[in-house]
Image (cartoon, helix red, strand yellow):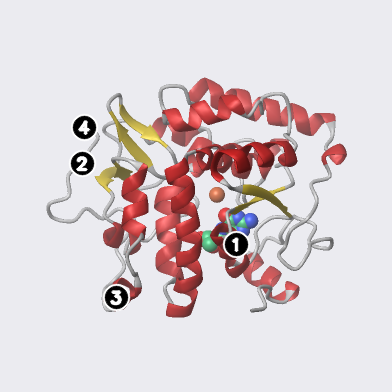
């Protein structure tokens, strides 16, 4: 199956999705699966300094807020001194959970993205944000992808979930379930929280790689909800991309994610097509706020 859409079509659709801003990456040198080489020597000293500043800010915020699996893996990745070389981490990751890092120019078509995940390859963007984007960036950059996503792939159960998600994405595209599945990715892989004996902790990359939301998502008494993850409820729930989340879905362990994604989603998609999507700030009868 041809896994690439025409470059122009893809860039036009994603550019329109990301509010019309043209994509920043260099899509000229990619292969048929949107993979490029990471030209590590091309990074400037200013970029390595910006990486260190981002890394230090997160390490002041995350201990006691990020899940242990993230903190432990990050320490083993030695990524504090500057933009890391993907190849080195990819070898360690492969030994740990059979995953590899593939360098990409930026956002890639859903089909190609799912194909990579289904084959235990995680796409990591090669470029770093500008200093003025220190606090917020629309497109995922190397800090979001590498710092936010890669450490969790060292956890075997989470790593299996992401591969299952990739396979589900390929099926979803055939069943018209893509938008539903994108919500699941958003509310787990990007913005998920997990219950631990020490309290709620963060495992979602979108929070782990951000500034303010790290404290906000764990603060009691905000206008956001913290409710137990029910997969079908999550697939129904709309999300916003440019504010803090109005709902955080909480799991008890990563096995719950894996088990919840194992069944055939086709009947769920059929049910969902008959139902109204839920606004991001919904609270249904019987749903309990978990963060008092
Ligand atoms: N491409 N490089 C990259 N990284 C992503 O996280 C990504 C993507 N393309 C599509 C996409 N995510 C989302 O639409 C997923 O829900 C599929
Ligand atoms: Fe991401």
As rendered, which of 135 and 36 lies closer to the eye?
Answer: 36
Disc 3 or 2, which lies upstream in sequence? 3
**Residue 85 image point, x, y percent:** 75, 37
Residue 292 disc label: 4
The answer to whether the residue bearing label 3 lies less than 8 angstroms from the nearest atom of ligand 1 is no
Residue 267 disc label: 3
For label 1, the crowd category at 10 Å Cα-Cα, with few meaning under 14, some 14 to 19 and many 20 or more, is many
For the residues labelled 4 and 1, the Cα–Cα distance comes to 38 Å
**Residue 42 image point, x, y percent:** 87, 40
Find disc 2 in the rendering and name its residue: 289
* Identity of the residue furthest to the right in this view: 41
Check the image and report above or below for 176 versus 79.
below
- Within the image, what quadrant is residue 77 found in? top right
Q: Quadrant of the N terminus?
A: bottom right
Residue mark closest to the camera, 4 vs 3: 3
Residue 117 appears in the picture as rendered = yes
Residue mark closest to the camera, 4 vs 1: 1
At x 28%, y 62%, the residue is: 232
Does 290 sit left or right of 200 as displayed? Answer: left
User: Are the residues tagged 2 and 4 within 8 Å (C-beta)?
Assistant: yes
**Residue 53 image point, x, y percent:** 67, 25
- Within the image, what quadrant is residue 181 found in? bottom left
At x 30%, y 36%, the residue is: 222
Q: Secondary structure at mark 2?
A: loop
Check the image and report above or below for 197 versus 154.
above
Count of numbered circles on the image: 4
Residue mark closest to the camera, 3 vs 2: 3
* Identity of the residue furthest to the left in this view: 286
Find disc 1 in the rendering and name its residue: 113
Q: Secondary structure at mark 3?
A: helix
Disc 2 or 1, which lies upstream in sequence? 1
For the residues labelled 1 and 3, the Cα–Cα distance comes to 24 Å
């Amino acid at each position: 199956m041809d896994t690439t859409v025409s470059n122009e079509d893809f860039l036009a659709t994603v550019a329109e999705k990301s509010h019309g801003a043209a994509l920043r990456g260099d899509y000229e040198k990619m292969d048929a699966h949107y993979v490029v080489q990471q030209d590590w020597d091309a990074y400037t000293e200013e970029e390595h300094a910006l990486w260190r500043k981002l890394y230090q800010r997160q390490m002041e915020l995350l201990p006691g807020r990020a899940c242990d699996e993230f903190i432990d893996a990050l320490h083993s990745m030695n990524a504090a001194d500057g933009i890391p070389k993907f190849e080195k981490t990819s070898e360690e990751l492969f030994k740990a959970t059979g995953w590899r890092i593939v360098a990409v120019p930026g956002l890639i078509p859903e089909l190609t993205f799912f194909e990579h995940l289904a084959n235990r390859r995680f796409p990591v963007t090669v470029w770093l944000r500008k200093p003025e984007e220190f606090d917020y960036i629309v497109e995922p950059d190397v800090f979001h992808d590498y710092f936010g996503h890669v450490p969790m792939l060292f956890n075997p159960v989470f790593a299996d979930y992401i591969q299952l998600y990739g396979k589900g994405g390929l099926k979803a595209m055939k069943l018209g379930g893509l938008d539903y599945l994108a919500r699941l990715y958003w509310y787990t892989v990007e913005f998920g929280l997990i219950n631990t004996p020490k309290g709620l902790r963060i495992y979602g990359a979108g929070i782990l790689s951000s500034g303010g939301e790290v404290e906000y998502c764990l603060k009691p008494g905000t206008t956001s909800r913290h409710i137990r993850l029910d997969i079908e409820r999550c697939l129904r729930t709309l999300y916003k991309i440019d504010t803090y989340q109005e709902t955080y879905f909480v799991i008890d362990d990563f096995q719950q994610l894996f088990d919840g994604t194992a069944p055939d989603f086709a009947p769920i998609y059929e049910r969902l097509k008959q139902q109204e999507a839920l606004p991001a700030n919904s609270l249904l009868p019987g749903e309990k706020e978990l963060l008092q």
